[in-house]
Amino acid sequence: MSDREIDLQLVERVRQGDQRAFGILVEKYQRKLIRLLSRMVRDQHEIEDIAQEAFIKAYRALPQFRGDAAFYTWLYRIAVNTAKNYLSSRGRAMQTVSDQAMNDDDEPDERLVAQEIGNPETELLSKQVAIAINQAVDDLPEELRQAITLREIEGLSYEEIAETMACPIGTVRSRIFRAREAISAKLRPILGTPEDRRW
Amino acid sequence: MTLHALTQQTMQPQAEPEDLQGQTLSALIDGELSDDMAQRSIKQLGQSAGERARIAEYLAIGDALRGLNAQPSDFTRRVMAALENEPVVLAPVPKASNRRPALWLAAATMAAITWGLWQSGPRDDVNVPLAALQQPASQSVEAQPYLAAHQDFAQAVISAPEMHFSKASLEVRQ
């Protein structure tokens, strides 16, 4: 089942009354959405407020979502309109033209992202987490590091990774899982999360 | 045991049940599960806070590696808290999760099409069951919701393979 189909399945679960399925969609797309909104709005608190409102509007509009576009594309359009309305109600213009963030296929272009603007504390913690994650990846055994990098950064499928690494797909699945668990374990002390809890 | 089989066994150590569950979640977010397994996993996520937390961590790790802010926040919690005041979204949709319709659905569609042809006028070349021919005109009113419902299913069968999420329509088309 593809990523897009998973989103459609989650939407279907929400429509069957499972609100928690929407939480997974929020978890999946919040960072991406916030980063793209930061191109339009300067203030970090406002960005998060707009992102929250966008998710709530998306939730309300789920009965109208037909799956013609990818869920994230649909969500992004809601977020852009929310940002425009939010700012115009305060007599302000967008920081940049939101259309620039869309590519020729009218999809949000991941390459057109701005620097995140936040307060010094949050920026410091973000940097610490990013450094810690990259350090944790560097500390992984070679085969785990290669697998997680090919998956998360290069975006290869398991089949492609298996071909690249000359190993079975089951091994790829296991390595990626073990890499994720190892990184999570390394981050817990930094985030102050107890050993038996998740972040 | 051949060397190849031994190598395979070594490369794929038997995982503990909890690790298998973790592997399943890990594969889920990568879009690498079969449709059945993915649907089961997604359904289970609604019942397990631990699994949702694990998924959240994996997603954050991926975002961080791609340069997005992975700083844990309570953003999701705030959104979900806001949604607690929202009515639960319920949208009746036809179950069209399988791309190939079940045999009964195809039979129902054919029955609907045959009924529609019969309704449009008597035709000698249409093989209509005698019982249907003998039905008085007054019963056509009762049959209309049945026909309309199956027209919707017929639309789902004939239309593009993607799942449609529009509300099921029971309008009677004149």
Image (cartoon, coloured by chain):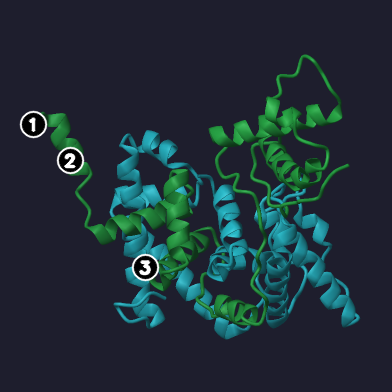
Chain colours: A cyan, B green
SS assignment at label 1: loop
Neighbour tally class for label 2: few under 14, some 14-19, many 20 plus, Cα within 10 Å: few
Residue B34 in the image: state x and y as whole percent: 44, 43
Chain hosting mark 1: B
Chain hosting mark 2: B
Distance from the alpha carbon under mark 2 to that under mark 1: 10 Å
Could you tell whether A43 is left or right of B60 in the image? right
Q: Are marks 3 and 1 on the same chain?
A: no
Neighbour tally class for label 3: few under 14, some 14-19, many 20 plus, Cα within 10 Å: many
Distance from the alpha carbon under mark 2 to that under mark 3: 27 Å
Could you tell whether A171 is left or right of A28 in the image? left
Q: Which amino acid does label 1 sit on?
A: Met
In this view, B108 is above or below A95: above
In this view, B51 is above or below A107: below
Residue at 37% x, 54% y: name it: B24
Q: Do labels 2 and 1 share a chain?
A: yes
Could you tell whether A47 is left or right of A8 in the image? right
SS assignment at label 3: helix
Per the image, the residue denoted by label 1 is B1
SS assignment at label 2: helix
Query: Is the Cβ of the residue at disc 2 closer than 8 Å to that at disc 1?
Result: yes
Which quadrant would the C terminus of chain B be assigned to in this image? top right
Per the image, the residue denoted by label 2 is B9
User: Residue A184: which numbered mark, if any?
Assistant: 3
Q: Do labels 2 and 3 share a chain?
A: no
Residue A135 in the image: state x and y as whole percent: 38, 65
Residue at 82% x, 43% y: name it: B138
State the residue in front, B50 or A136: B50
State the residue in front, A48 or A190: A48
Residue at 37% x, 48% y: name it: A146
Residue A109 in the image: state x and y as whole percent: 70, 52
